[in-house]
Image: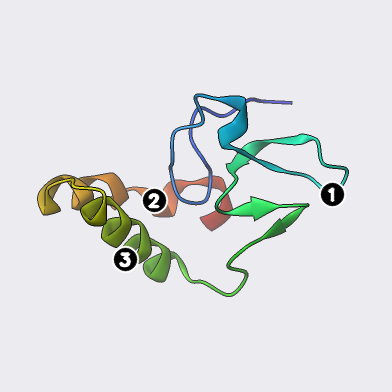
């Protein structure tokens, strides 16, 4: 199974094992972060890709990233596996 370097839902880097979400059997997910995916289910099941872009952008700004950089982070979010 392919190990992704960023969450395929929100694009968060998956550098550390503890950043990864979990499957139903509690194994670490190879695709998703702990904020998006736990015990084999998405935390925000009904969110649209546009809503996720806004959510991630707002979180980045909240964390101190400049608005233009936050906007760049979410620009290609729609190309991630969850949103294909």
Query: Residue at position x 80%, y 35% from top?
Result: 27
Q: Position of residue 68 (x, y in %)?
A: 11, 50
Q: How many marks?
A: 3
Query: Residue at position x 52%, y 51% from top?
Result: 9
Tag of residue 54:
3
Q: Position of residue 21 (x, y in %)?
A: 65, 43
Up the image or down, 9 lies above or below 52; here it is above
| Image side of residue 71 versus residue 29, left or right | left
Q: Which is nearer the N-term, disc 3 or disc 1?
A: 1
Circle 3 SS class: helix
Label 2: which residue? 77
Q: Position of residue 71 (x, y in %)?
A: 20, 53
Label 1: which residue? 24
Whether residue 43 is visible to the viewer of this picture, yes or no, is yes
Residue 63 or 24: which is nearer the viewer? 63
Circle 2 SS class: helix
Query: Residue at position x 60%, y 43% from top?
Result: 32
């Amino acid at each position: 199974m392919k190990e992704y370097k960023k969450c395929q839902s929100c694009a968060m880097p998956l550098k550390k094992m503890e950043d990864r979400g979990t499957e139903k059997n509690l194994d670490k997910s190879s695709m998703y972060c702990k904020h998006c995916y736990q015990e084999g289910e998405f935390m925000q099941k009904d969110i649209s890709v546009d809503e996720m872009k806004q959510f991630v952008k707002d979180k980045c700004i909240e964390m101190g990233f400049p608005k233009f950089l936050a906007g760049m982070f979410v620009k290609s979010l729609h190309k991630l596996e969850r949103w294909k």
